[in-house]
């Protein structure tokens, strides 16, 4: 007869106050941490970008816009639609934040779509996709500035 532990894979059996408990190996903990880090980093980057964008547009409600998007991220659609005109040119901080935000969002989508339905493979593939999307969006976001600068110099 095959024991259930042999079928389930390498589990550590730990004696606890309520008897023996099977705990996951360290690899599981790393995958869970990686799986939680990328969405958390995306959320923080989104909040920072909204704050920098609202400040650059001289919005009357910078903190209210930022707090609304922080608590309810789908409010970003309303923020982008109703935000005022830009008062200052895009700063380097804003460009860097936008680059990281777009790369993280794209990497999460690519990691979700192209990963097998395995909880442990998805964070690995998302991180791999981030290694591809970060230089790509850096080029795209900073290329816009170069194109605008050369047009201004030509006129």
Image: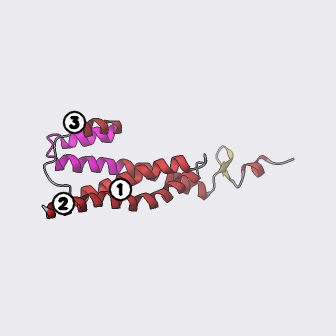
Q: CA distance from mark 2 to mark 3?
A: 29 Å
Q: State which tag comes first along the sequence, 1 or 2.
A: 1
Q: Which one is in front, 121 or 152?
A: 152
Numbered disc in front, either 1 or 2: 2
Where does the image place residue 16, in percent across and percent down from the top left? Answer: 65, 48
Question: Which mark lies nearer to you, 2 or 3?
Answer: 2
Helix, strand or loop at disc 2?
A: helix
Residue bearing the label numbered 3: 82
Circle 1 crowding by C-alpha within 10 Å: few under 14, some 14–19, many from 20: many
Say left or right for 70 vs 37: left
Q: In the visual, does 61 lie left or right of 108? A: left
The residue at the point 70 percent across, 55 percent down is: 10
Residue located beneath label 2 in the image: 151
Q: Is residue 61 above or below residue 145?
A: above
Label 3, residues with CA under 10 Å away: few <14, some 14-19, many ≥20: few
Residue 21: x and y, percent? 67, 47
Mark 1 or 3, nearer chain start: 3
At x 72%, y 53%, the residue is 9
Q: Position of residue 62 (x, y in %)?
A: 19, 43
The dot on residue 100 is 1
Q: Which region is colored magenta?
A: 44-72
Magenta stretch, overall SS: helix
Task: State the separation of the CA atoms marked 1 and 3.
Answer: 23 Å
């Amino acid at each position: 007869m095959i024991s259930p532990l042999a079928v389930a894979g390498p589990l550590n059996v730990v004696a606890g106050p309520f008897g023996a408990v099977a705990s996951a190996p360290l690899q599981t903990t790393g995958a869970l941490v990686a799986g939680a880090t990328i969405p958390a980093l995306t959320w923080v980057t989104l909040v920072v970008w909204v704050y920098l964008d609202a400040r650059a547009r001289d919005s009357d409600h910078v903190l209210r816009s930022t707090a609304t998007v922080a608590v309810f991220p789908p409010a970003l659609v309303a923020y982008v639609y109703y935000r005022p005109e830009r008062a200052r040119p895009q700063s380097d901080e804003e460009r860097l934040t936008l680059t990281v935000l777009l790369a993280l969002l794209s990497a999460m989508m690519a990691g979700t779509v192209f990963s097998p339905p395995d909880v442990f493979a998805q964070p690995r593939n998302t991180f791999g996709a981030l290694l591809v999307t970060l230089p790509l969006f850096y080029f795209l976001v900073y290329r816009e500035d170069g194109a605008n600068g050369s047009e201004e110099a030509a006129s």
